[in-house]
Image (cartoon, grey):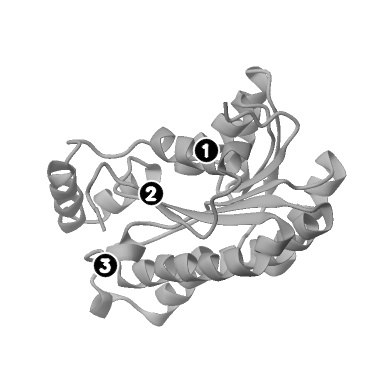
Amino acid sequence: MFELKDKIAIVTGAGRGIGRAIATILAKQGAKVALADIRIDEARECEREIKDNGGSAIAIKTDVSELSSVKEMVNVVHDSFGQIDILVNNAGWDKMQPFLETTPDLWDKIISINYKGVLNCVYCVAPDMINKGGGRIISISSDAGRVGSSGEAVYSGTKGAVISFSKTMARELARHKITVNVVCPGPTETPLVDEMKQDSDRNKKIFDAMAKIIPLKRMGKPEDIAYAVLFLASDEANFITGQVLSVSGGLTMV
């Protein structure tokens, strides 16, 4: 089940956290994985780990907020592996603050990475999938984009935009046998969450409270998200498109 032998996958933000777990699990199932990350040292660590376990991967320094950088990354993938079968839009960033304490510069950074990054990647990869007659696009949104989240107004907005954009792309690309789906993590143990906890006591209290009210009584782990992505990337999910899958331990049930 969920065999990805000889599939070529791009995972953005693959150097750490959820992206690293996704890349590792896709490689374990046989995919050749391009690790696109602005943190190239961390991406190279992931590359070494995958290769040490018998997989195939290449780390590529990529700034998803810049179209030219994404185009260069896609060219490297073509040169290294050939066609692109799977795109996982995972790269994301946030700084947890009440909206009225934020600045326009912060808005621009969050929007550029979380939303424009998805636009850039789909814009560069979808034509290749159209030419080859199919593909899988999976974007990592957030339950914050479905129900909102205190201290994450702009982040929530970008993640909601990813959901709407993906549903539209699912309609536009279905005729080309390209499926487009979204995975929405709930609170998950990642380096970014650790950084936000360290920013303020208020943030730490918010995350600690979330962990207590999750019905399954724990924060998510990157692997929990990665297995959902694996399913949507597989042939077993070839009749699923335009859908949003929440992986939140039951925190949201709408």
Image: 145 above or below 1: below
Residue 168 in the image: above or below residue 82: below
Amino acid type assigned to the residue bearing label 2 in the image? Leu
Q: Secondary structure at mark 2?
A: helix
Secondary structure under tag 3 reads: loop
Q: Nearer the viewer, residue 119 or 128?
A: 128
Report which residue position mark 1 lands on: 231
Residue 170: image location, x then y, percent: 58, 63
| Residue at 65% over, 61% down | 174
In the image, residue 172 lies at what x, y percent?
A: 65, 70
Count of numbered badges drawn on the protein: 3
Closest to the observer: 54 or 181? 181
The kind of residue tagged 3 is: Gln
Counting residues from the start of the chain, the first of labels 3 and 1 encountered is 3
Distance between mark 1 and mark 2 Cα atoms: 25 Å
* Residue located beneath label 3 in the image: 97
Residue at (74%, 67%) from the top-left corner? Answer: 68
**Residue receiving disc 2:** 192
- Measured in 3D between alpha carbons, the distance from the residue under mark 3 to the one under mark 2, in whole angstroms, is 14 Å
Q: Residue at x 42, y 41 (%)?
A: 225
As drawn, is 28 to the left or to the right of 32? left
Q: Quadrant of the C terminus?
A: bottom left
Determine if residue 69 is in view: no
